[in-house]
Image (spheres, helix red, strand yellow):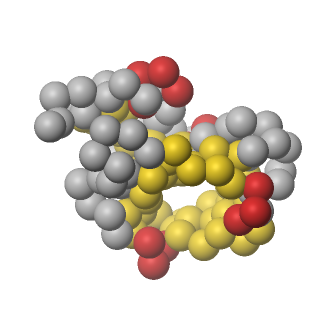
Amino acid sequence: MQEQEYFGSCHCGNVQFKIITDAPELTTCDCSICIRKNALMVKVHESQFELIQGEGSLTEYQFHTHTARHFFCKVCGIYPFHRKRVSPYFFGINVYCLENFDTEGIPVRATIGAGMA
């Protein structure tokens, strides 16, 4: 896939962002929070992520090592992205929050987050 710009938002539209990615793969995670939110994620470097609006509408949740930073919209509760634990200069973007993002043909890798100490 060629590198493209995608716009994303939470459900209510208060949080809006854009990313640039070639989406080489998508990931799922089996840690205690990801298994519950059931998101499908694409990894992007922080230089390829821009929060357009809604910083004040975001709330942050951290657990376990308090390294990963999971963000949710305070208004609608949607999880649009998180800052990754193992690679903190990257974001995991919920592809279901992206406009016109087609997951067809992109490999999905299951990550083992539950076993991370």
Query: Residue 72: x, y in percent?
Result: 63, 45
**Residue at image location 52% in from the left, 27% down from the top:** 37
Establish if 18 lies above or below 109. Answer: below
Can residue 61 be seen in this snapshot? yes
Quadrant into which the N terminus falls: bottom left
Residue furthest bottom as drawn = 47
Up-down relation of residue 104 to residue 55 (above or below): above
Total count of labels: 0
Whether residue 100 sits left or right of residue 3 in the image: it is right
Q: Position of residue 60 (x, y in %)?
A: 57, 50
- Residue 76 location, x and y as percent? 79, 37
Q: Which residue sits furthest top?
A: 36
Residue 37 horizontal side relative to residue 30, left or right: right
Q: Residue at x 23, y 54 (%)?
A: 86
- Residue 8 percent across, percent down from the top left: 68, 54
Instruction: Name the one closer to the observer, 26 or 11.
Output: 11
